[in-house]
Image (cartoon, rainbow, N blue to C red):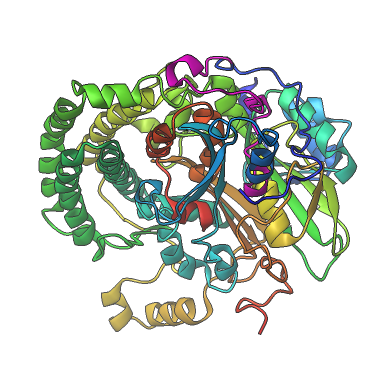
Amino acid sequence: MAIEAPEKPTTATPDSDAPRSQFAGRVNTQETGATLAGLRPAEDMIIPGVEDVVEESVSHHKPKGSDPISDQTMILNMGPQHPSTHGVLRLVVEVDGETVISLAPDIGYLHTGIEKTCEAKFYQQVVPLTDRIDYLAPMTNNTAYALAVEKLLELEIPPRAQWLRVLFNELMRINSHLVWLGTHAMDIGALTVFLYCFREREQLMRVFEAVSGQRMMTSYIRIGGVSMEPPMGLFDQIRKFLLDFPSKIDEYEGLLNANPIWLGRLKGVGLLSQEDAIALGVSGPPMRASGVDFDLRRDMPYSSYEKFQFKVPISNEGDVWARYIVRMEEMRESTKICLQALDGMPEGRYVADAPKIILPDREQMKTQMESLIHHFKIVTEGFQVPAGEATSSVEAPHGMMNYYVVSDGTAKPYRVHMRNADFANLQALEVMCKGRLIADVVAVIGSLDIVLGAIDR
Amino acid sequence: MPESIDTPATPEAIFGKDAVTAALADHAAIQRLQQFITDAKWDRGELTLTVAPETIVQACEAAKAAGYNFFEDMTGVDWYPSEPRFQLSYSLLSHRLKQRIRVVVRLEGDTPTIDSITGVWPASNFYEREVFDLFGVTFAGHPRLTRIMMPDNWNGHPLRKDYPVEGYR
């Protein structure tokens, strides 16, 4: 390795006396047979940069003349086109044999400047941009953005729109978890599961297409409500799917739960303690799999979630297996929430009664002067939002999704910022992978369920 | 914790340190951050506390001690051309109290510096790198402050308001 040794191999970290994690010392060198001499302790929990990994690797070199095979570690580049990184994630991994010594994610390959673009659009034009952030759960993005803007506008959302939001947010969770399960299992080597998952996902895609005209970039949930009334017969179609779906989950579990390879690759891998999860900002299923009992839908409800009964699955194991169990249970709970939403679906308007903000009914626009004027004004000039700042927070399939919207009183947002769980969850990657085999990195990435669109924005 | 925080007796917005302190006297964050607050706002059910930039680390530690255990988010807002130009908004969540606060600092000048809070929450690592990359705010004491979204040789900080949407040509 032709990298010159720098004077100072490691950077000082400010919290070196932070409490040791409960899993520190449980890195099993016996199992892997690797030597971990010179391993920088993981307790600082600061995920390193690419340069840190390279510099540290140099510091692990032994003096000339020692055994050439055990002499040095290797830097391995993984991605950004590696299939198991679920997008354009690049990892720089320092390995000693097959054992990970340190690891740095390199992100930004999918950075499209959505936050900057938002500042040049009207409030209602931002909705289609939000679809493209976490593209496995576009309606959840829409909901989070709509909630933030509605908070600024202090809009009252009718019950039917809130129930529709809950219904489609939960269908999106099932959709996202199906993609997670299919690809995660495929990474581990269980190729068949992918086909089963995508069979059910196709039915959901048809539902989304029926309701919004689009399979993925739905933009169905808008500021003030939803974009249109669902077509006739759609609720029956969703109900049929939901009644059938628990048996499909059993089918996936039948393929996986007794599979010795699946068990061996998941159990005890990628441990993340409760303290580490909180310190590193991990949220969503990985946090709940580490024993933190917190779910925004139950604890800080939005969009009428307080009217639904459901359990929040948690586990204290903190490994890849626990995240698998938690997500499978979440799919079952989501099914229940969807059925409750269908059963209790209120009648009435699907958008708020705010003619200066909501586009008018198409028929009214053709016959009534005021509606035509409102339509023209909203489309050409947008609507003004009172100055202020607002944060919305929803429980997305990947974790906590916050939208921070700042208004200066004009028709365009002054600042839109998205907090996606994926971005923070990625920081826990090194803590989970350190001292484990390189193959476990693949399992851990799969269990984090990242979408690079949400990380890079 | 009192129930009154989620459903305040005064639904209207309250502005100013004294008014907010009086109205929400039993709020955990108000009590523990009292000495750091320079300005406060209760608006749309959200509590925003402005603190001096020099005290951000102590303020975060005080917030952590008050029960706001989870660092959610940190981002910037550029108020160019007015001064102080940059606003940094730290969003902190309490799992136990089930509420969040926003801690705000305002920074003067084109190349501001503020202390890093990676010592309080390691989770702030990526967020500080992002704000450094996109706004050009420097975080003193950050373990490795490098660009995270843009290429290393990029010119300018894209989320500043004097940076054109289409980029420099």
- Can the viewer see residue A428 in this picture? no
Question: Can you give x and y, in whole percent of width and height, for residue A41 in the image?
Answer: 66, 25
Question: Can you give x and y, in whole percent of width and height, for residue A451 in the image?
Answer: 42, 49
Choose between A280 and A58: the one closer to the eye. A58
Magenta stretch holds residue A45? yes
Q: How many marks?
A: 0
Q: Quadrant of residue B165?
A: bottom right
Q: Is residue A123 left or right of residue A206?
A: right
Q: Is residue A324 above or below residue A193?
A: above
Q: Is residue A441 above or below residue A118?
A: above
Q: Quadrant of residue B30?
A: top right
* Residue in the picture at 19% in, 54% down: A207
Q: Is residue A22 left or right of residue A207?
A: right
Prevailing secondary structure class for the magenta stretch in the rendered image:
loop
Choose between A112 and A131: the one closer to the eye. A112
Q: Which residues are magenta?
A: A25-52
Question: Can you give x and y, in whole percent of width and height, for residue A308 in the image?
Answer: 33, 31
Choose between A55 and A25: the one closer to the eye. A55
Question: Can you give x and y, in whole percent of width and height, for residue A379 in the image?
Answer: 45, 78
